[in-house]
Image: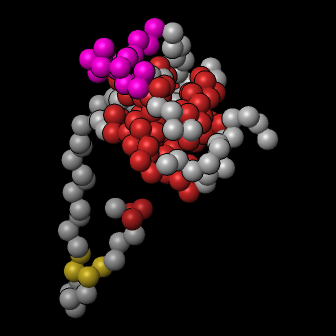
Amino acid sequence: MSSTRAAGPIPEQLQHKFDLGLWHALFNWADLTVAVQNQWGGPDSSDKRDWLAGQISELFATEPATDAEDVEVMLLQVLEDEFGVRLEDETEVAVAREIMAIRKEIGEGNTATVDALQKKWEERKGKEVATGSVSIRESNQEGEWDSVDEESDEDENEDVDVEMGNAPALVPAKPKPEPEVDEEGFTKVVGKKKR
């Protein structure tokens, strides 16, 4: 097992500090901040960040043996499921380590890191962290294929319309010959070829 494994349960009186530390760790994660600012998780992207902090807190409460790798997996999964982001920069590793460090300190009754994060946030007056180092590369294969299909369908329909042109003018139908009735009142049947 690694040294990032959680120690013991979080003292109840420090649970609030731990939750605050989780929130700050996520708030300071530039990749998540970009996703929230651009509302990749929809109009409630900020709420999803708060929800993620709660989910991590709950993970530790239900599974005290949670380690950094478990946290990394959760971070990646939520970013992909809720924000449509697939990370390749491995920043989730640093965030998970920070969360584990906060977890360890809180477990020992130490709130120094959380207090420092809180002070830093207050100095920024609650503004989002700088995201200048985040590199974004869009890759939506389904969307690309869909747009190609839609364009080709439109092109085919346009070609058909152009080839058909205007419909020809209507020509009056040949008048039907009057039915021939013989002396006894029977109607004479005339074949189509003889008309």
Depth check: give the residue in front, 152 or 122.
122
Which residue sits at x=46%, y=8%?
Answer: 132
Q: Is residue 8 magenta?
A: no
Task: Pinpoint residue 129: horizontal percent, then vertical percent.
Answer: 39, 16
Task: Pinpoint residue 67: horizontal percent, then vertical percent.
Answer: 66, 41
Viewport quadrant of the C terminus:
bottom left
Residue 59 appears in the picture as rendered: no
Question: In the displayed image of the protein, which residue is found farthest to the front?
Answer: 109
Task: Pinpoint residue 158: horizontal percent, then vertical percent.
Answer: 39, 28
Depth check: give the residue in front, 53 or 9.
9
Depth check: give the residue in front, 115 or 29.
115
Depth check: give the residue in front, 27 or 62.
62
Question: In the displayed image of the protein, which residue is found farthest to the bottom?
Answer: 184
Specify whether 135 is left or right of 64: left
Quadrant in which residue 74 is drawn: top right
Which residue sits at x=79%, y=41%?
Answer: 1
Which residue sits at x=44%, y=43%?
Answer: 14
Quadrant in which residue 16 is drawn: top left
Quadrant in which residue 160 is drawn: top left
Question: In the displayed image of the protein, which residue is found farthest to the top?
Answer: 132
Residue 61 appears in the picture as rendered: yes
Task: Pinpoint residue 35: horizontal percent, then vertical percent.
Answer: 42, 26
**Magenta segment boundaries in residue numbering:** 115-132
